[in-house]
Amino acid sequence: MKIKNTYQPKIVIVGSSSVDLVLNTDHHPQPNETVLAKNFENFFGGKGANQAVATARLGASVYFVGAVGMDPYGQQVIRNLVDEHVNVGFVAEKTRHETGTAYVTSAKGKTSIVVVPAANNDLNHFDIDIAEKIIFQADLVLTQLEIPMTAVEYLFKKCKELGVKIGIYAAPAKPLSLEIIDYAEFIVAKSNDLSTIFGEESREDILKKLPNKLFVRDDSNSTVFFDGNEMKYYRNDPEEMAHKMGMGDAFTSSFAIAYCHGNSISDCVKFGNDVSRKVAANKGSQGGLPFLKDVI
């Protein structure tokens, strides 16, 4: 993996932010069952904010385009991003809804998550238009699917008009249009989401149609892609697993950093796996994200 020490890629993240409210229990409740939590924790999250923090810690100049509510959680989210050296000049404060939240039940290394998008659902094409000047200057734009699909589709259209590269972490899973699939520089997806995103074909058939573009992940921190000749598999099991929140965001972010520095696809995947492995050992989607000096 090569990193150009004098080069700081400019990355624009367009996506979600939230406060994650985590209940740690002995087991996941069944329908009509009441479970007592061992404790309760708060973390900063949202796939967009996770990627903003991750890319900033890995040496990028990062701008975040998102939406929060006019509530204390919104101010906390903004303050956290500022502390992480993320530019928040294009974060819209919305009056219609409060800041997004995620309610997480964590038991025995597995999580059940209910996301309340709230203000994230208010991100729209006007917010993207306001950010056009920094999108135009970006080396890469990153987005996810915790914001409205209308905003994602408009963002792709904007990037195509401006000739700017864009990558997407297709989670939570929604169908992607052919326009998004065609223009995306890379797509990261979970293995159990492929039928929702691409339709009812086998994993191998889908991968073969998207060589060096689609990267499929699973819970064991393994990644598979098709390089145009053969399937490539990378697996890097975490030594410790606090929980799996944020591993996909960590992979996407570190893949993007390696990609911006001109590394091979294989090296980008390996770097992504290495970084996501570190995240799994820490609680919270952002707390375990490493700094560049820790992984290079």
Image (tube, rainbow, N blue to C red):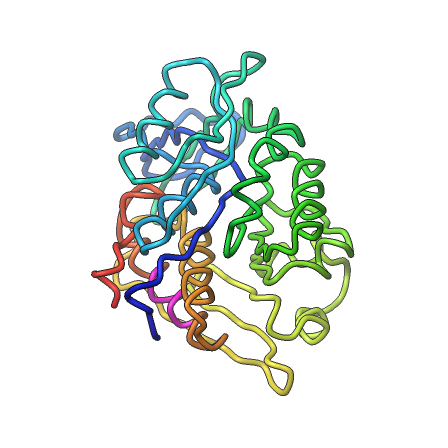
Examine the rendered structure and indicate whether residue 271 appears above or below residue 29.
Answer: below
Total marks placed: 0
Q: Position of residue 145 (x, y in %)?
A: 60, 42
Looking at the rendering, in which quadrant would you find the N terminus?
bottom left
Give the residue furthest to the bottom. 229
Q: Position of residue 36 (x, y in %)?
A: 33, 26
Looking at the rendering, in which quadrant would you find the C terminus?
bottom left
- Which residue is pictured at 33% across the width and 35% down the height? 25
Examine the rendered structure and indicate whether residue 116 appears above or below residue 226.
Answer: above
Give the residue furthest to the left. 293
Image quadrant where residue 172 sits: top right
Q: Nearer the viewer, residue 66 or 232?
A: 66
Q: Nearer the viewer, residue 214 or 143?
A: 143
Q: Could you tell whether 137 is left or right of 203 in the image? A: left
Examine the rendered structure and indicate whether residue 132 appears above or below residue 1.
Answer: above
Mainly helix, strand or loop, the magenta region?
helix
Image quadrant where residue 37 sits: top left
Q: Position of residue 94 (x, y in %)?
A: 54, 17
Which segment did they paint magenta? Answer: 270-275
- Which residue is pictured at 43% across the width and 74% down the height? 263
Q: Nearer the viewer, residue 31 or 296?
A: 296
Is residue 91 inside the magenta stretch?
Answer: no
Q: Could you tell whether 44 is left or right of 47 in the image? A: left
- Which residue is pictured at 41% across the width and 43% down the height? 50
